Amino acid sequence: MTRQEKDYLGKMTLPDSALYGIQTARAMRNFPVTGMRADPALIWAFLILKKAAAQTNMELRELDRDRGRAIVYAADLILRGQHLDQFVVDVFQAGAGTSFNMNVNEVLANLALEHLGAKRGEYDRLSPNDHVNMGQSTNDTFPTASHLAILLLSARLLEVLDALALALERKGEETSRIIKTGRTHLMDALPVTLGQEFLAYATAMRKARKRINQRRSDLLELPLGGTAVGTGVGAHPRFRARTVSRLAGATGWDLKEARDSFEALQSRSEMVAFSGALRELAVELTRIANDLRLLASGPVSGLGEIMLPAVQPGSSIMPGKVNPSIPECLNMICFQVIGNDLAVSMAGQAGQLELNVMTPLMTYDNLASLRLLDNFLPIFTSSCIEGIKGDEKRCMKSFENNPILATFLDKEIGYLKGAGVAKESLRTGRPVKDVAIELGYVSPKKAEELFDAKAMATAAHKRRRL
């Protein structure tokens, strides 16, 4: 069964089972790019936006009750999980997102028509453009829905980062008495505790979360109401304020009208900044993942100071090999997030005059990055961080043989003599303490005082807590 629809470019035949219409069908023909469709968060955002717009237009008596209630019914039907397969436009599409906006408008229109007892495609009775899209343009609805979708997924990320930071803090407390050799330039340095390293990772996650939340708050300002170029042509004067208020009530977020509707259409700076915050998180996560891989390297020829949970066999040919699979996967995810940010940055500067038409790409990349992080960071927390064990014996062995411990002699014998002790320790493989005693620089009693490992660990832990 088929039906015909027409627009000002001509006619097309559509399957009668399709809830979408002719403009969506044209987009499907024009943009068969990836086979990837809109993120469910973006669909949700468009639906609550269209529902709020219909309710406002009814309240303002711009839209009659029969049509308005039918549109609200259709939106609620999809929000309950029905007909999601009808959102078929590729994520790479015509600029500004007109194709996807019309996909939403047409699906809602046809469901509303059926609710009114009409047939699909009878747009003279209820139109995707005139009624579902009333008081709106793609140019203000797509960025508005983008903000809402990012707000939705980023709320989950904030929770995920809280859990990760807490796990790192607990691991820091658990390993707070394991003293080890610190490293700078990948070379032996003064001692630290394993706990200090993990507590520092937790601090980095807390800071990254704070930056993301700051950038997230910028997205609470919505471009809705500017319609095509910022002037609000086609919308009732009170449409913007009432619809934003409705969206705030529906979501529980402190949503606001854009202070400058022209800037709100020209610039996507908030989305660029948010992507930048995700990039900053990815950089920190990459650094931490690399540290974990290095600390767990071995088990014989590497550092081997920590043991990561064994989650799967590490080789198809080498029996018993276990790899740092979870941190490796996190690295790849972070590299993708960083790449996504570059695309968002390029798209951000590609707007011209009254509109940035690259919003679909910016939306896709921000949501894709959020999905990657939302999905995997809980696994990184539970399958890696929570199960890490410190190898206290190995840490102590490298600590005791560390020639840089000669630094603790500085106040007793000075830098140059200390350097000589360090050099002799490295040459002979003997502990610094023994070399210093043998050379007569310190008494055995003083050496025990200066190089007491437990005292060093306690002091180091206290310094971290100050």
Image (cartoon, grey):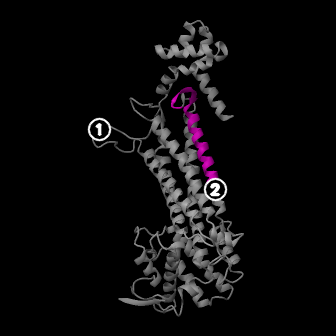
For the N terminus, which image quadrant? Answer: bottom left
Q: Earlier in the sequence, mark 1 or mark 2?
A: 2
For the C terminus, which image quadrant? Answer: top right
Mark 1, Cα crowd under 10 Å, few <14 / some 14-19 / many 20+, is few
Residue 204 in picture, x, y percent from top left: 60, 44
Q: Is residue 376 visible?
A: yes
Q: Element under label 2?
A: helix
**Could you tell me how far apart the alpha carbons at marks 1 and 2 are, in whole angstroms?**
45 Å
Name the residue that disc number 2 marks: 213
Outermost residue to the front: 353
Vertical arrangement, residue 43 with respect to residue 162, above or below: below
Vertical arrangement, residue 50 with respect to residue 254, above or below: below
Range covered by the magenta-colored residues: 185-214
Amino acid carrying mark 1 in the image: Met
Name the residue that disc number 1 marks: 318
Residue, x 60% and y 58% (percent of image)? Answer: 274
Residue 87 in picture, x, y percent from top left: 46, 75
Q: Element under label 1?
A: loop
The residue nearer to you, when weighing 345 against 75, is 345
Residue 405 in picture, x, y percent from top left: 57, 20
Residue, x 60% and y 13% (percent of image)? Answer: 417
The secondary structure that dominates the magenta segment is helix
Amino acid carrying mark 2 in the image: Asn
Please give the label number shown on residue 275: none
